[in-house]
């Protein structure tokens, strides 16, 4: 059974058509990346799934239930740093209504933040803040994890390490993940399937299954199979990016 | 000089003190040098002597304490009602729509213009003094607190909702803690203004307080006492401001770290 079903979702903001009739389903234990150029509406789609935006038409079902508002069953990590600045790392992870001390302790160790439990967000690097945000979302035991370019603001080296961390967590726990990114390598490295979105209005252009075996290692990024996926997706995205810039 | 380049702590203190020294030097030169008549401006030595007289002979300490009590009384009253109302307005837009136009109008009503009316209503006792400060502080606090709460980062609110927080929990666990340091800062600012209102209130229809002493001294042309009174207000303001800042730093270490 599909965990999340996106059923004919469109979204308009005034005269701007952000999303047009998106149909997409995310299976249990799936790791689906939504890949698209900036401004294609991929973040809006994720926000609709989170319940932070109401779709203009269509609906989102989670385990057969229509999504009407945000809830703890859909954990979200934002691109901007959204830790509560007045709470320590541990208290941020404990914020969720379903979080417990035991889960917080386990997750702090899992994301490598032991020794920083009592630090305030301002005292942490960007990578550490996003690790805390990931732990905070996981502590709530969501049915699905929604990630909106969570590593977009990080430098390249930190981003690569964060990808491995998230992938490691997924390989260990098989959480269902919906991951939005504009980074092609990131999408291939992490995903089971990559959904490519077209430029404004955002439509689903293609779904590419990534048949690279798990566990994945960063050295995989230089293999011929990886490059083949990269070549294909680069071509797809390039056309869409050109459309956004009105070059074609 | 390089723009925006920080200055060391030692140099900062030295520069700050240097201005006071220069100021007093200029004052001393103007008065001791005979450039300004003592009728208009007392010299620093006379000011200090008159101040000492005030304290030991005229019980000025009691006036100082009464004025401090009025400032804090009026301010606490305004904050106790104004902060919760401002929070409600910042968090709930219908509440804001209901109160905001009236309060925006009221904040421009000068507190000093209310003094004759307040004397009529409350006499010349303590209640009237507190009311002047209340009128001067209350509307400002409400509006500024409402803006501080309303400016809470939307992404933090969204994050809280995705973590399962209810509407009420978002107010209690996100809007209020997020606005708390700014509310403390607003309180510090408004307390400073309250000092202006209290002196105005004491200039008219009062029989005690620093403002009353200043008024009496004017009748006697005692500029030394007037200046001493003003300096006392400045010193108390400086101390209360410093204490408030220190308290805020202790209460909200996360906003500075």
Image (tube, helix red, strand yellow):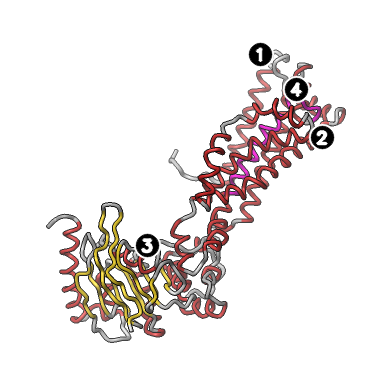
Left/right of residue A130 with respect to residue A206 in the rendered view: right
Mark 1 lies on a secondary structure that is loop
Residue annotated with mark 3: A53
Please report the residue visible at 47 percent of the width from the left and 60 percent of the height from the top: B156
Q: Main secondary structure of the magenta part?
A: helix
Q: For marks 4 and 1, give the one nearer the viewer.
A: 4
Q: Which label's residue is closer to the chain start, 2 or 1? A: 1
Instruction: Please state the horizontal and vertical placement of residue A36, each as a whole percent of the image.
Output: 24, 66
Residue B5 on the magenta segment: no
Residue B204 on the magenta segment: yes
Q: For marks 2 and 4, give the one nearer the viewer.
A: 4
The lab-note entry on whether marks 2 and 1 share a chain reads yes
Where, quadrant-wise, is the N terminus of chain A in this rendering?
A: bottom left
Mark 3 lies on a secondary structure that is loop
Residue annotated with mark 1: B35
- Extent of the magenta region: B183-208
Q: Which mark is residue A210?
A: none
């Amino acid at each position: 059974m599909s965990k999340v079903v996106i059923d004919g979702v469109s979204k308009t903001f005034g005269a701007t058509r952000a999303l047009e009739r998106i149909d997409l389903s995310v299976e249990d234990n799936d790791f689906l990346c939504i890949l698209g150029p900036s401004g294609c509406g991929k973040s809006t789609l994720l926000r609709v799934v989170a319940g932070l935006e109401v779709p203009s038409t269509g609906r989102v079902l989670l385990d057969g239930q229509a999504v009407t508002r945000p809830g703890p069953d859909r954990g979200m990590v934002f691109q901007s740093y959204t830790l509560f600045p007045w709470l320590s790392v541990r208290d941020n992870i404990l914020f969720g209504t379903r979080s417990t001390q035991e889960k917080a302790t386990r997750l702090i160790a899992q994301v490598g933040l032991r020794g920083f439990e009592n630090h305030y967000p301002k005292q942490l690097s960007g990578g550490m803040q996003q690790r805390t945000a990931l732990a905070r979302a996981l502590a709530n035991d969501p049915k699905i994890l929604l990630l909106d370019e969570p590593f977009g603001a990080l430098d390249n080296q930190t981003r690569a390490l964060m990808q491995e961390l998230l992938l490691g967590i997924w390989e260990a726990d098989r959480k269902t993940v919906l991951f939005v990114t504009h980074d092609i390598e990131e999408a291939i490295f992490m995903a089971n399937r990559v959904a490519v979105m077209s430029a404004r209005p955002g439509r689903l252009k293609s779904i590419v299954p990534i048949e690279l075996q798990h566990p994945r290692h960063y050295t995989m990024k230089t293999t011929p199979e990886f490059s083949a996926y990269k070549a294909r997706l680069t071509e797809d995205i390039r056309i869409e990016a050109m459309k956004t810039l009105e070059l074609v | 000089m390089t723009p925006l380049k920080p200055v060391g702590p030692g140099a900062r203190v030295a520069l700050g003190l240097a201005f006071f020294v220069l100021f007093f030097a200029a004052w001393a030169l103007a008065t001791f040098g005979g450039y300004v008549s003592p009728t208009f401006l007392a010299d620093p030595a006379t000011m200090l002597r008159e101040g000492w007289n005030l304290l030991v002979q005229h019980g000025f300490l009691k006036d100082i304490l009464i004025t401090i009590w009025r400032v804090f009384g009026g301010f606490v009253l305004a904050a106790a009602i104004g902060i919760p109302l401002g929070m409600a307005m910042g968090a709930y837009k219908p509440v804001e729509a209901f109160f905001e136009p009236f309060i925006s109008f009221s904040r421009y009503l000068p507190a000093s213009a209310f003094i004759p009316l307040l004397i009529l209503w409350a006499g010349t006792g303590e209640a009237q003094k507190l009311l002047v400060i209340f009128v001067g502080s209350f509307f400002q606090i409400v509006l500024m607190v409402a803006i501080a709460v309303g400016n809470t980062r939307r992404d933090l609110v969204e994050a809280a909702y995705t973590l399962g927080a209810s509407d009420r929990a978002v107010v209690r666990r996100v809007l209020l803690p997020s606005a708390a340091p700014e509310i403390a800062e607003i309180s510090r600012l408004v307390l400073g203004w309250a000092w202006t209102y209290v002196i105005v209130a004491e200039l008219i229809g009062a029989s005690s307080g620093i403002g009353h002493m200043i008024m009496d001294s004017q009748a006697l042309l005692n500029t030394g006492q007037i200046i001493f009174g003003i300096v006392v207000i400045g010193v108390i303001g400086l101390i209360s401001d410093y204490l408030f800042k220190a308290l805020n730093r202790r209460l909200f270490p996360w906003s500075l770290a």
